Image: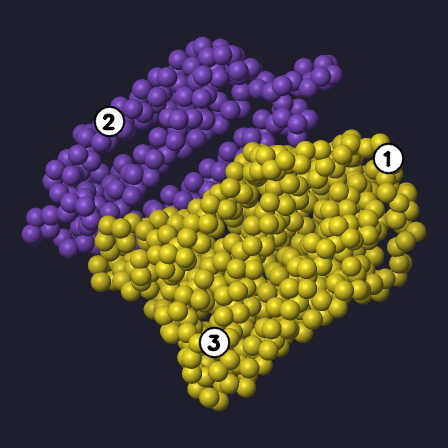
Chain colours: A yellow, B purple
Amino acid sequence: MSAPEHETPLPETPASAEPPSYLGGEYGTRSWLLTQDHKRIALLYLLGVTFFFLLGGVFAVLVRLELLTPPGDLFQSETYNKLFTQHGVFMVFFFLIPGIPAVLGNFLLPLMIGAKDLAFPRINLLSWYIYMAGGLFTLYAMLAGGVDTGWTFYTPYSSTYANSQVIAAALGVFITGFSSILTGVNFIATIHKLRAPGLTWFRLPLFVWAHYATSLIMVLGTPVVAITILLVAVERLFHVGIFDPALGGDPVLFQHLFWFYSHPAVYIMILPAMGVISEVIACFSRKRVFGYSFVAFSSLAIAVLGFLVWGHHMFVSGQSLYAGVVFSLLSFLVAIPSAVKVFNWIATLYRGSISFEAPMLYALGFIGLFTIGGLTGIFLATLAVDVHVHDTYFVVAHFHFVMVGGTVMAYLGGLHFWWPKMFGRLYPEQLARVTAVIIFVGFNLTFLPQFVLGYVGMPRRYHAYPDEFQVLNVLSTAGASILGLGFLITSAYLPWSLRFGKKAGANPFDAAGLEWTTASPPMAHNFEEVPVVTDEAYERDHAELVHV
Amino acid sequence: MSSATETAPARPATLAHQFESHEQQSLAAALGMWAFLVQEVMFFGGLFTVYLVYRTLHPAAFLEGSAHLPVDLGTLNTAVLIGSSLTMALAVRCGQLARGKSAAFFIAATMALALVFLGVKSVEYGHKWHDALVPGLRWAPSPEADPHLNLFYALYFVMTGCHALHMLVGLVLMVFVARKAWRGGYTSANNVGLECLGLYWHFVDLVWIFLFPLLYLLGRHGPHP
């Protein structure tokens, strides 16, 4: 972009005699645990998020094992309830929500906007400690007996009929919420106030727009679920009927408050993923993103509309019919900004100079899987269809297409794409490509059969099922094994590459963006001097552009 | 504003490394504080929503509960808290004028008023304990009381409790800010810490301005339907 050394050809490392990278300098445990460098904090988050992802994965393996055969032979129903609850709680609150923003966003936002750090480095570190405290609290709840309410903590499962660990698990989620809020506040102040000279709003990478929209949801939504969880705890501790109908409370009110956050939380998971996809598609098709401002505003539109659709989770909960109709229509509207993104990515690919590196394979996988996940969301937002498939495996398949097919694909794609920037080493490209295909195949084999299962009537959250569902369940479990194998290979070769990978230059993929103008890995303060931006986003060396 | 940084090549110690000027640092901190207050609004907004729903469902229980609350003590506390907002505003003004000792004095006055508020509040809590109107811990209302009276009192304690907790946090913050102000830590170019404390305290005050009529004044505006 604007940095003077931009003309250097790509495999070369920048000039020597530079300050040590953020990984060098100090090495002690203390220098990591008390660091205020956003890049080191991002790596701390990477460790935490990976831990909880693997933990959530173990529970998924156990769930799929039980569902291999029709009778409930491996676990009792109570154990099974705890398994899927723990899978959901860890994956949603401790992997999917913090995943992309706290790892990739933390690392990249300041680099992308030409800043030395986030606006509030100490609060950034604090947010990691809060996140870990919440995670360990929830882990304790699981070890001390577990929770069987489902990840949604619905009353009266979480009030009248629950075992006693609900409070501990819910408080873990409550605590972690504050790390999300602090991250959101930090990102908003950073994007507003720390952009490099010349970097106007409409020159920002779309990754930054996506994280801005995400931060708005974090700040506006998370406190509502915090107070809701607090009220559940008060209800259980003091036996007041806030949500418990037996004591005069209203369980539907809990669902309203819970989904007011937890539906927008779905967009906390998917919006940063969409930001990753925009960057990756632009890089590997060697073009600017088609319709930049539409993609940017569609992020904001999703964030705003996301707050108006929570009632589509409650079509069969005794909500009024008129509310149901309005929520159904509003939910359809979310399809518009989502489709804007998908069409614009495809238009970006059109006549681009496409290459199929591993991040691009993940991005292309994302587009297909997110489209299926999004379209089945339209089915579910349709009142009559939802009544038919509510609480079946159709719903499970739908949200796994969005969360795993969408968020996890983008997370892995982004992790590969910026891996050389984070560590200065290239991942093994061929192996990564093969693994991306394995994950894609495994994913589809796991979750496509679940659409069929749900449509023909298999309800979710049961450990036993009739014999006629077995073939599809075996397919699903087989797919989950392939998917798990893909994750295992990835978690083997990425750490391997830290030591044995080829050294990466400043810009190994020849991508546009400020983060690629500084060294890999970057120095502690990111840039040798404050960059001045004169180009539009994704503006490349004009000779390389493929002119249509 | 930033003339000091432009003329002097060395960075002032009060300027964090990620910022280019005190002005940028102050704007970022203030924006961060406003964003944080937005999440506070949503936090209390959730509580107010629960209040709204149950007051609509059980208006009689809320009227009865409100009638038990001492309007005189509530009014006194409202006046005390508004007074503390005034002293806090004066402290912020002194910070802008770089009069650190006066700022510290006004913060101390704010703390004194906050302690008066919390003292009155604990007297009120004591009365509720004595009257056995604390749901879950000491609950024995009169036999003819509305069956949903416990909802009103649960919300009363959660809402005023959350508010009091925010005041305690404010008190702790005030100790640090007052100490820094006393030592001349705030200049006319760099007083955003004091400014943010002021924003926070006015927010806490504002929450009470909504809590007071919603909890204490039900049915006191004339004949109730």
**Percent x, y for residue A62?**
49, 70
**Percent x, y for residue A291?**
74, 56
Report the front residue among A257 and B223: A257
Q: Secondary structure at mark 2?
A: helix
Q: Residues within 10 Å of mark 1 (few under 14, many from 20)?
A: few
The nearer-to-camera label among 3 and 2 is: 3
Measured in 3D between alpha carbons, the distance from the residue under mark 3 to the one under mark 2, in whole angstroms, is: 58 Å
- Indicate left or right for B108 with A106 as reference: left
**Residue at x 89% of width, y 58% of height:** A547
Q: Residues within 10 Å of mark 2 (few under 14, many from 20)?
A: few
Residue B4 in the image: above or below residue A508:
above
**Percent x, y for residue A105?**
64, 47
Say which residue label 1 marks: A16
Measured in 3D between alpha carbons, the distance from the residue under mark 3 to the one under mark 1, in whole angstroms, is: 57 Å
Kindly identify which chain the residue marked by label 2 belongs to: B
Q: What label does residue B119 carry, if any?
A: 2
Q: Residues within 10 Å of mark 3 (few under 14, many from 20)?
A: many
Say which residue label 3 marks: A66
**Residue at x 42% of width, y 83% of height:** A71
Is there one chain holding both mark 3 and mark 1?
yes
| Res A370 seen here | no
Q: Amino acid at mark 1?
A: Ser
